[in-house]
Amino acid sequence: MLNGCRANDRRCERMLFEWLKEFAANICFRYASHTIEVQDLVCDGFIKVFKNLHLYNEELYGCNEAAFKGWFKKVLINNCINYRNKFHPKIMYTEDALLMLAELEDDAEFVLDTMSYQEILNSITLLPPAYRMVFNLYVIDGYTHVEIADMLGITTGTSKSNLFKAKNRLRNELQKKMTVKKYV
């Protein structure tokens, strides 16, 4: 299929799109503010993948689904960051290198057990864009603070501070939901 896409075979491109469109939408949803942005990010991400498919080296990365999805995910995340920089340049990151990272408390973890994936994802989307970006990159996508700082053009202290604040806001949101679930 990849070789067909490299040869601009529309049938192969359609197959790749159908295979990965939900995967792409789920990744972009975490970084976007609106459904329209998700659609733009997915379309733009696929365009970038088709244009740069020659850069995907099966010998280096592997020729299995997981390896390709990892490469594809990286393209999508970079696309989301570039989109944010282009269309939302005023997103402010805060810096406070003295803050220590906070872990979710036991009662908040209990809430996670009673919440659906969609409820958790919806709580994450309520975070301010700067906090959501760092939270997604660190917690969900597994980047280090040094990598995040490099990708976003911020300091590692700013990355840590934004993660700390994102976790606090998320904890408060989860605790609110826990209180509501107790009484429902």
Image (cartoon, rainbow, N blue to C red):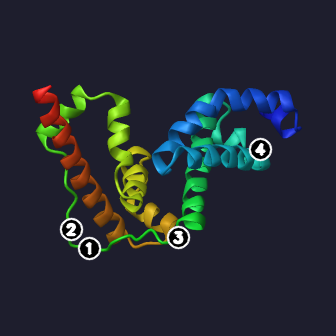
* Element type at mark 3: loop
Q: Which residue is mark 2?
A: 99
Please give the name of the residue rendered at 32% of the width and 37% of the height, measured from the top-left corner.
120
Please give the name of the residue rendered at 70% of the width and 43% of the height, measured from the top-left corner.
46
Q: Amino acid at mark 4?
A: Phe
Specify whether residue 30 is in view: yes
Sequence-first disc among 3 and 2 = 3
Q: Which residue is mark 4?
A: 50
Residue 31 position, x and y percent, is 48, 50
Q: Nearer the viewer, residue 117 or 96?
A: 117
Residue 14 position, x and y percent, is 77, 29
Sequence-first disc among 2 and 4 = 4
Q: Which residue is mark 3?
A: 89
Q: CA distance from mark 2 to mark 1?
A: 6 Å
Q: CA distance from mark 3 to mark 2?
A: 25 Å
Q: Are marks 3 and 4 in contact (CB under 8 Å)?
A: no
Q: Check the image and report above or below for 65 versus 45.
A: above
Q: Quadrant of residue 148?
A: bottom left
Q: Which residue is mark 1?
A: 96
Q: CA distance from mark 2 to mark 4?
A: 42 Å
Count residues near mark 4 (Cα–Cα under 10 Å), then give few for <14, some for 14-19, many for 20+.
some
